[in-house]
């Protein structure tokens, strides 16, 4: 309830401030950038983009979402540096490769540009090495543990599972995989492999089929986002694996929601990524306009299952979930 009240207050504040901003001169218009490691071609990031755009409209400012076509850290860093050169009023950035972001963020802060992290952040051993002001997103590691514990009653002791990762080395996805693996190995006595399936859907299906052929005792597949879930769902349908190999995933998209309704996917973690786009812009605006410091904002981690899939389906199609 406290979280809901807080969210309502933020939304009301944004709308009221948007009304105030509308009367300012064009010369005072501020531009905020949200720069992700992947662009809106990924269904997940399309929702973040929607949040960014809606916040910009509510506040009467220019809010720009950017990201490379596929995960490309050098290209993302170049976009970030271009935003700094353009004198952005504030920048939000996903930290999927911590070592790549230490210097760029330091440079931006030295120039007086506020920076917040969204979606993923550096691991505990590197905490504090990147001087962003706040983190807006989900705890990836704990979310991995949560979905693994949800699946445990459906698996036998010592069961084999595979975690399919479409962006190997992505710190957030690796943290999800770590949480899943730790729970299943330590609490179930299971065997867990990590599999790089790439971002190419055709290759992903081929890699998964080869893995299942080599490991016919596999009883569960965990995907860590829509780019991995969509080809996995296609393979399960085509190969008649429904009920034979269980599946769980992260994030929402129409294909995954339909798979949950069809009994192919048991559950998916919802990190409410719309908030990552919307809240980051709001916080950067409040800092730029009123010097209110950004604060960590946990966008949450809940499970969408067969019991509540229908309730969120319409919002997924509308681009809010």
Image (spheres, grey):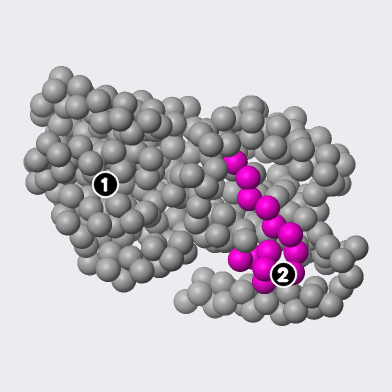
Q: Earlier in the sequence, mark 1 or mark 2?
A: 2
Q: Residue 194 sits in which quadrant?
A: top left
Which mark is nearer the camera, 1 or 2?
Answer: 2
Element assignment for label 1: strand
Q: Which residues are magenta?
A: 54-67
Q: Quadrant of the C terminus?
A: bottom left
Q: Residues within 10 Å of mark 1 (few under 14, many from 20)?
A: many
In the image, 311: left or right of 127?
left
In the image, 86: left or right of 70?
right
Q: Residues within 10 Å of mark 2 (few under 14, many from 20)?
A: many
* Marks 1 and 2, how far apart at CA: 37 Å
Residue 79 shows up from this direction: yes
Q: Is residue 62 magenta?
A: yes
Up the image or down, 20 lies above or below 53; here it is below
Q: Which label sits on residue 202?
A: none
Residue 145 shows up from this direction: no
- Report x, y in % for residue 119: 54, 47
- Report x, y in % for residue 93: 64, 44
Query: At x 13% / y 23%, what residue is drawn?
Result: 213
Residue placed under numbered mark 2 in the picture: 59
Q: Are marks 1 and 2 in contact (CB under 8 Å)?
A: no
Q: Residue 247 sits in which quadrant?
A: top left
Q: Between 236 and 128, which is closer to the camera in this rendering?
A: 236
Q: Is residue 66 magenta?
A: yes
Element assignment for label 2: helix
- Report x, y in % for residue 175: 44, 37
- Report x, y in % for residue 206: 25, 25
Q: Which label sits on residue 248?
A: 1
In the image, 31: left or right of 40?
right
């Amino acid at each position: 309830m406290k979280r809901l009240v807080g969210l309502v207050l933020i939304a009301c504040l944004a709308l009221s401030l948007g009304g105030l901003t509308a009367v300012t001169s064009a010369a005072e218009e501020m531009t905020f950038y949200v720069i992700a490691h992947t662009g809106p071609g990924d269904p997940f990031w399309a929702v973040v983009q929607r949040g960014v755009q809606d916040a910009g409209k509510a506040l009467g400012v220019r809010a720009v979402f950017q990201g490379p076509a596929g995960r490309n850290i050098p290209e993302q860093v170049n976009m970030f540096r271009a935003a700094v050169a353009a004198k952005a009023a504030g920048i939000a950035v996903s930290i999927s490769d911590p070592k790549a972001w230490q210097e760029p963020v330091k440079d931006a802060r030295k120039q007086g540009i506020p920076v917040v992290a969204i979606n993923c952040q550096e691991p505990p051993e590197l905490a504090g090495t990147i001087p962003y002001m706040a983190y807006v997103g989900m705890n990836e590691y704990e979310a991995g543990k949560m979905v693994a514990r949800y699946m445990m009653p459906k698996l036998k002791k010592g069961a084999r599972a595979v975690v399919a990762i479409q962006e190997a080395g992505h710190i957030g996805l690796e943290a999800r995989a770590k949480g899943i693996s730790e729970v299943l190995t330590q609490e179930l006595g299971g065997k867990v492999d990590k599999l790089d399936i790439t971002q190419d859907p055709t290759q992903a299906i081929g890699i998964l089929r080869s893995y299942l052929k080599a490991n016919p005792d596999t009883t569960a597949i965990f995907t860590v986002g829509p780019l991995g879930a969509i080809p996995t769902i296609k393979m399960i349908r085509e190969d008649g694996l429904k009920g034979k190999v269980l599946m769980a995933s992260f994030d929402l998209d129409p294909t995954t929601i339909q798979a949950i309704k069809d009994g192919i996917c048991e559950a998916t973690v919802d990190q409410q990524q719309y908030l990552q786009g919307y809240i980051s812009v709001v916080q950067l605006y409040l800092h730029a306009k009123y010097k209110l410091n950004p604060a960590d904002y946990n966008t949450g981690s809940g499970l969408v299952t067969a019991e509540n899939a229908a309730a969120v389906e319409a919002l997924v199609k509308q681009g809010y979930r």
